Image: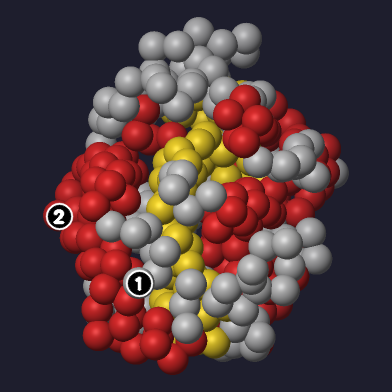
Amino acid sequence: MTQKVPVLVTGGAGYIGSHAVLALLDAGWPVAVIDNLSTGFRWAVPAAAAFYEGDVADRALVARICAERGIGAMMHFAGSIVVPESVTDPLKYYRNNTAGSCALIEAAVAAGVPHFLFSSTAATYGIPEVSPVTEDSPKVPINPYGTSKLMTELMLADVARAHAINYGALRYFNVAGADPEARTGQSTAGATHLIKVAVEAALGKRGHVDVFGTDYATPDGTGVRDYIHVSDLAAAHVLALEALIAEPARSLTMNCGYGRGFSVLEVLDAVDRVTGGRIDRRLAPRRAGDPDSLISDNSLIQATLPWVPRHADLDAIVAHAFAWERRLSEILVGAGS
């Protein structure tokens, strides 16, 4: 039986972080959240979690939280995630993602926190020559977002060799969907994720959906991606934390995806099926750096953790995202946003 130590979740008021908080609380873990609310929402943090407003780079604050809550593990989701913005404002990404992570890891080591889960990304692979992508595939990121995440992975590996800490770096593919009970979901305005954009369009919040590129080497010419339900991803974090606690000398780096891809047009067809409508699709040129296909080889996580995805169905992912989008409108009206 894993000892359920208090967990500090950074970015716990954001999209993936808030789902991880729910997964931890549902499984009986004590949880504290730190979030500067730059993109997260205070209402996304359940009352059962202790909340601290602040920045992960504030070492004094992190030290205080660790002391007050007896933190035994950290899950690090805080950071900037918009790829095009990382190209135009790289210093923001190296400051928020790399330097911020460095300060947090320093605080973890100083406080004697022995376990660290890191939210990494398939962007560390850049444009892979082969898909599905394994963890051993070359890491050649093509934008500052991917580079900033890879730098943090490298930091964690070095720190784990020098200090009494182990880590898990989970490389996400395309995260989508929302909590099946509609307790939280993707709430940031102006999001660029396809399923979020598509359900907004289905509800009239956007006039159309741009399809970037129709000449890829894929069955229908549009880009193919591996979509993973955010609740399955959150469950993987809890299982990875249990694995780190069970084997303190072992660290883990694993892909998080389903090992199956869907094209942009297949996703839009799924949204039409779920919503009973028809999204206006507008064909647009390719975006620089978009690979034809990006699919995970998830055999390592399947072999390492007792992870059994519960929502590996595109229509279910879309249905949960759509239900959340409708609820979000009510929440924002109630919050005066």
Q: What element carries label 1?
A: loop
**What residue lies at 74% left-to-right and 31% top-to-bottom?**
269
Q: Are marks 1 and 2 in contact (CB under 8 Å)?
A: no
Left or right: residue 46 versus residue 51 is right
Q: Foreground residue, 86 or 158?
A: 158
**What residue lies at 37% left-to-right and 78% top-to-bottom?**
36
- Which amino acid type corresponds to the residue marked 2 in the rendered image? Leu
Give the class, few, some or many, for how many residues have Cα within 10 Å of label 2's Cα (few <14, many ≥20). some
Colour style of the rendered protein structure: secondary structure
Q: Earlier in the sequence, mark 1 or mark 2?
A: 2
Residue lying farthest to the left in this orientation: 91
Q: What element carries label 2?
A: helix
Compared to residue 220, the image places residue 317 above or below, namely below
Q: Foreground residue, 200 or 192?
A: 192
Compared to residue 163, the image places residue 226 above or below, namely above
Residue 291 position, x and y percent, is 42, 21
Q: Can residue 20 be seen in this view?
A: yes
C-alpha distance separating marks 1 and 2 = 30 Å
- Which amino acid type corresponds to the residue marked 1 in the rendered image? Gly
Q: Mark 1 points at which residue?
A: 112
Quadrant in which residue 6 is drawn: bottom right
**What residue lies at 50% left-to-right and 36% top-to-bottom?**
254
Q: Mark 2 points at which residue?
A: 91
Left or right: residue 208 versus residue 115 is right
Q: Quadrant of the N terminus?
A: bottom right
Residue 130 position, x and y percent, is 45, 11
